[in-house]
Image (cartoon, rainbow, N blue to C red):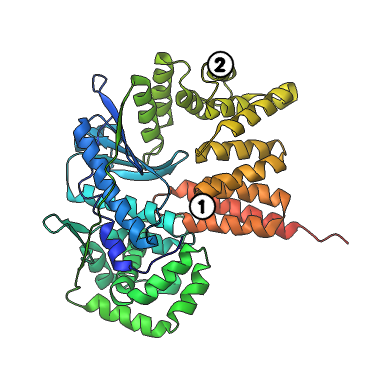
Amino acid sequence: MALRVLWVGWMLTMMSGCASTRAVSPREQDAAWTEVRSRHFRVLTNVEAQTATRAALELETLRGAVSRLWGGEEDIPGSMDVVLLRDAAELEALVPGTSGGFSAMSAEGALLVIAQEDSVQGARARARALGYELSRRVLLSRPRWLAEGLSRYLETVSVERGTREAVLGREDIPSLALVREKGWLDIDALWEQALKPSPEQQQWRDASAWLWVHFLAQEQPARFGKWLALLARGEDSRATWDATFGDLDALRKGVRQHASREQHAARASPLPSIPEEVTVHPLDSADVHVLRARVLLHAPGRDAREEALAEVQRALDEAPTHVDAATLAARLSAGLPEHLPRAHALVRDHPENARAWMLLAELLDPSLERGAQAEAQNRAASLVRDDVSTLVRVANSFDATHQLEEGLPTARRALSLDPRSIAALTSLSSLSLRFSGCSEAKRLQYLVRDLLDGSTTADFREAMEQRLHALERDCNDIRPQR
């Protein structure tokens, strides 16, 4: 994607859709649940449809502005699910301790869970989540400190409703106070990320990242924009940093002056028009149970698998061949005998559903039904269109059965649909290791590491680091044949 260097304008627009987005909760059995789908968002909510529609359009305002200013008229692909809960009390009841909401990357893509009522915490949570997601989509190469600094930089964005201008560059008071009291990490230290830092260490890192990003965006916009353009092309982040910014001593002096400045000028940029087409569909009770399970599975700081499985079972009680419920049930309770006959029922009732065939392929025993497994794999591959998560599952299934000729193009297709998909990159890395050796496999896995940020759980980040270490170890163990 070509990157137009209109850095300040892009950043200013990012909060416009976030500031007043609202949410609904899947708790009440008598509530009417609705899906409002716009070009880049799927709002799942039990607030009234008009409120949900307004939330989706506000998010599209953000998306339209970011798309135009990052890449001219070229659209930024991808979508985000937004669970809109009625109020903060519903959010707290469903996921305790998530005041303001939370975001996560799931197998189905980006997920944002928020409450309808406005608050400073909620506005910041929305801005932070969208900062993570949009920088992930735009920047193919992205060190974690930059992801954190960008997201925190966006938290203070506001929209002037009268002029329809977005204002960026206001100070993040907690971050500024922390770096003034404790100092800040040097840029070299920011590139070194501890696997599981303490909350206090991470807070200091995030505040330091915010300071560097704020300084670069406000006082070095041309060079910062040039560097971001290189990252958007996937070029090495550290090498391009050194080439772009050169004299680090001068930068360090500039950061010191920036941190001590009494006031930092904010900047404004007009918001563009946005597409207003939306579709509204009711959700049935089984859909809502699956949605609750998905939210519980990705709630930060707790293990809610048992609660999620109970919600999935309620969905299956109401709709025994619900594809999403059956898939989640197999994931959460692997090995149970009822999963295979349920998968056969799924493909009988949903013969055109790629996910149903993929679940059947994953559950069939190749030693007993190799032909049947291959048929299910091929049916899934032929039916799936632009569902990245299902394409990755198909590719992984081909990988597991050593069908590299089928798996590689499937994984590449998934990555072409979402070049920043961690699941697609990981799948293609594994297949590439088997097909073409270590060099490409390691390159792809390093890209995965660059895409991990604050929306990634510590456990998942550790798993990806261990995967990279294992890949490096295996590759180092390979000796050239004599």
Q: Is residue 482 above or below residue 326?
A: below
Is residue 125 left or right of 239 when viewed as pictured? Answer: left
Is residue 280 left or right of 373 when viewed as pictured? Answer: left
Residue 369 in view? yes
Q: State the separation of the CA atoms marked 1 and 2.
A: 34 Å
- Residue 450 lies, in percent from the top left, at 49, 59
Residue at position x 49%, y 25% from top?
329
The foreground one among 1 and 460 is: 1
Residue at position x 50%, y 64% from top?
233
Is residue 435 left or right of 255 when viewed as pictured? Answer: right
Q: Secondary structure at mark 1?
A: loop
**Residue lying farthest left?**
162
Q: Indicate the quadrant containing the C terminus: top left, top right, bottom left or bottom right.
A: bottom right
The foreground one among 419 and 449 is: 419
Q: Secondary structure at mark 2?
A: helix
> Three-letter amino acid code at disc 1?
Pro
Residue at position x 42%, y 82% from top?
248
Residue at position x 36%, y 64% from top?
205
List the residue tagged with mark 2. 348
Neighbor class of circle 1 (other Cα within 10 Å; few <14, some 14-19, many 20+) is some
The foreground one among 193 and 243 is: 243
Say if mark 1 contacts mark 2, CB within 8 Å. no
Q: Is residue 450 above or below residue 358?
A: below
Neighbor class of circle 2 (other Cα within 10 Å; few <14, some 14-19, many 20+) is few
Lower sequence index among marks 1 and 2:
2
- Residue 310 lies, in percent from the top left, at 40, 22
Is residue 143 left or right of 126 when viewed as pictured? Answer: right
**Residue 42: mark:** none
List the residue tagged with mark 1. 419
- Residue 462 lies, in percent from the top left, at 51, 51
> Three-letter amino acid code at disc 2?
Arg
- Residue 427 lies, in percent from the top left, at 60, 45
